[in-house]
C-alpha cells in the first residue's frame, strides 16, 4: 500500500490485519453457514480488537462519539484482500451501529456500542424499502404516535444482517408528505412484538433479508437525533461509509492484481511467460495504476473525514464510485489473464468476480454517486 496518506505504522497495521485475516479469520469464515450471520467470526474480530478500532471512543471507562474513518478503510482494504466475509461482517458492525453512536442518547450508546465493539451484538442499517432504494426520501414505513412513543408499520428490504441482527437502525416516516424532512431514525431491538423477517439469497458475502413491521412499538428514548431529522442521520452515515466501501473494492482489486501478476509470471505460452506478452503486461500496468488511483481517492476522503472537513459528501461519493467501478474492471481483467481456470468454482477470482458486483449497487448505486457529485458541483 502506497497511498500518500498512509504512514509506516498504518502500513504495518494493514499488513498485520491481512496476515490475521488469512491465518485466523478465513477458516472461521469458511466454516460459517452460507447466508447466515457468522457470530463466531464477528466474535473473533471482537477478541482480536479489530471491532474496537472502529469506535476508539468506546472504552471501559466510558464512551465518546468518535469514529476513525482512515482506520475503517485500512481494516476494510486489508480484510478484503484475504477474506471478504470478515470484511463485510466488520463493515456491518460499523454501518449498523454508527447512527446510534452519532445521534443516540447516552444510555442507548452505552447499551449497544460496547457490545458491538466486543462482537457480542450484531446491528443492521435498515433504510431501503421495496418502493424506496435510490430515492431514499420516498420511504413509507410509518411511525405513528402511540403514547409517548410510536408504532412502526411497513416493510424494509435488502437489509444486511436481517433478519438475524440484535438491533436495527430503522428510518421511518413521522411526517407524511414531507419527503426527506419527515423521516425519523430509531434503534429497534430484535424481538419486539410485531417485528418479523426473512432471508433473501443473494450473490454477496453476507446475510441479507427483508423485515416486516406490524405495529412495532418504539420508545422516545430510542429515537436517534431529532424527530423528522432522521434523513440527515442516514446521509451522514453514508458519507462516512462510502469511502470505506471503496476501500473494500480496492482490497479486492489488489488481491486480483496480485493473482494476475503471479499467474502471468508462471504461465508459459507461445514460448515464454505470459507476462512477456505486451498485451498482458500493459493490462497489468493499467490494473495497477487504476487500483492505486482508487486507493488515493479512498484515503484522501477518509483523511478529510478524520480532519473534520465538512465538504466530505462529494469526495466520499467520488471514492466509492471510482473504486467500485475500478475493482470491477480489475477483477474482470484478472479473469481474462487467467483464462478458463479463473472461472472454475472455488478459484479466488471466481469468488471475487461474484463479490465485486454488489458494491456498485449498495450504499448508493454508481448513478446515485454521480448525482451527488454533480449536485455538489452546482452548489
Ligand atoms: N449530510 C447531511 N445532510 C444531508 C446530506 C449529507 N450528505 N445529504 C442530504 N442531506 C440533508 C439535506 O441537507 C436536506 O436537509 P434539509 O431539507 O433540512 O436541508 C435533506 O437531507 C434532504 O436532502 P436532499 O433534498 O438533497 O435529498 P434527496 O431526496 O434529493 O436525496 C440522494 C437524494 C440521491 C442523495 C439520496 O436519496 C441518496 O443518497 N440515495 C441513495 C440512498 C442509499 O445509499 N441507499 C442505500 C441504502 S444502504 S445499503
Image: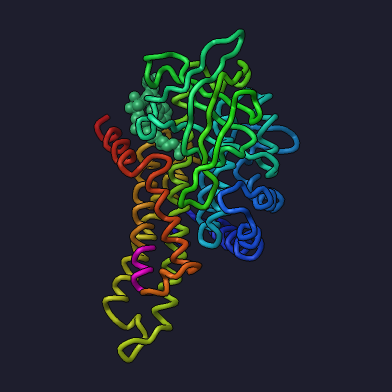
User: Within the magenta stretch, is there residue 335?
Assistant: yes
**Image location (x, y in percent) of residue 340:** 38, 74
> Magenta segment, principal secondary structure?
helix
Q: Is residue 337 left or right of residue 5?
A: left
Q: Is residue 302 left or right of residue 324?
A: right
Instruction: Please name the residue shown 50% across and 50% down the image.
Output: 73
User: Within the magenta stretch, is there residue 219?
Assistant: no
Q: Which is more toward the observer, 16 or 112?
A: 112
Q: Which is more toward the observer, 350 or 117?
A: 350
Q: Is residue 126 left or right of residue 331?
A: right
The residues colored magenta run 331-338
Position of residue 119 relative to residue 327, above or below, is above
Q: Is residue 102 visible to us here?
A: yes
Instruction: Please name the residue shown 41% across and 14% down the image.
Output: 176
Please identify the residue farthest to the bottom as the structure is shown: 271
**Image location (x, y in percent) of residue 263:** 42, 77
Position of residue 371 relative to residue 137, above or below, is below
Please identify the residue farthest to the right as the structure is shown: 60
Amino acid at each position: 500500500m502506497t497511498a500518500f496518506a498512509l504512514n509506516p505504522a498504518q502500513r504495518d497495521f494493514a499488513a498485520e490485519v491481512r496476515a490475521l485475516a488469512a491465518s485466523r479469520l478465513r477458516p472461521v469464515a469458511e466454516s460459517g453457514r452460507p447466508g447466515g450471520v457468522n457470530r463466531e467470526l464477528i466474535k473473533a474480530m471482537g477478541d482480536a480488537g479489530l471491532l474496537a478500532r472502529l469506535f476508539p471512543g468506546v472504552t471501559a471507562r466510558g464512551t465518546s462519539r468518535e469514529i476513525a474513518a482512515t482506520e475503517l478503510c485500512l481494516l476494510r482494504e486489508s480484510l478484503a484482500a484475504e477474506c471478504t466475509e470478515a470484511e463485510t461482517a466488520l463493515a456491518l458492525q460499523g454501518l449498523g451501529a454508527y447512527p446510534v453512536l452519532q445521534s443516540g442518547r447516552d444510555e442507548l450508546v452505552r447499551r449497544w456500542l460496547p457490545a458491538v465493539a466486543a462482537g457480542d451484538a450484531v446491528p443492521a442499517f435498515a433504510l431501503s424499502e421495496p418502493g424506496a432504494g435510490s430515492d431514499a426520501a420516498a420511504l413509507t414505513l410509518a411511525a405513528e404516535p402511540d403514547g409517548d412513543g410510536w408504532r412502526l408499520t411497513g416493510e424494509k428490504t435488502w437489509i444486511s444482517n436481517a433478519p438475524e441482527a440484535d438491533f436495527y437502525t430503522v428510518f421511518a416516516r413521522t411526517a407524511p408528505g414531507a419527503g426527506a424532512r419527515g423521516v425519523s431514525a430509531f434503534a429497534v431491538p430484535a424481538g419486539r412484538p410485531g417485528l418479523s423477517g426473512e432471508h433473501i439469497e443473494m450473490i454477496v458475502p453476507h446475510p441479507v433479508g427483508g423485515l416486516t413491521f406490524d405495529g412495532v412499538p418504539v420508545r422516545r428514548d430510542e429515537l436517534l437525533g431529532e424527530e423528522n431529522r432522521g434523513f440527515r442521520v442516514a446521509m451522514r452515515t453514508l458519507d462516512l461509509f462510502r469511502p470505506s466501501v471503496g476501500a473494500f473494492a480496492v482490497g479486492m482489486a489488489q488481491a486480483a492484481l496480485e493473482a494476475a501478476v503471479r499467474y502471468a509470471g508462471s504461465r508459459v505460452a507461445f514460448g515464454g511467460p505470459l507476462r512477456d506478452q505486451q498485451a498482458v503486461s500493459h493490462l497489468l500496468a493499467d490494473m495497477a495504476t487504476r487500483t492505486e488511483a482508487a486507493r488515493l481517492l479512498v484515503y484522501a476522503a477518509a483523511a478529510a473525514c478524520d480532519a473534520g472537513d465538512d465538504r466530505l459528501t462529494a469526495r466520499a461519493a467520488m471514492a466509492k464510485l471510482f473504486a467500485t467501478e475500478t475493482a470491477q474492471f480489475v477483477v474482470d481483467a484478472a479473469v481474462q489473464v487467467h483464462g478458463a481456470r479463473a472461472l472454475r468454482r472455488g478459484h479466488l477470482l471466481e469468488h471475487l468476480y461474484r463479490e465485486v458486483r454488489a458494491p456498485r449497487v449498495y450504499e448508493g448505486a454508481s448513478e446515485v454517486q454521480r448525482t451527488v457529485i454533480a449536485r455538489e458541483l452546482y452548489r
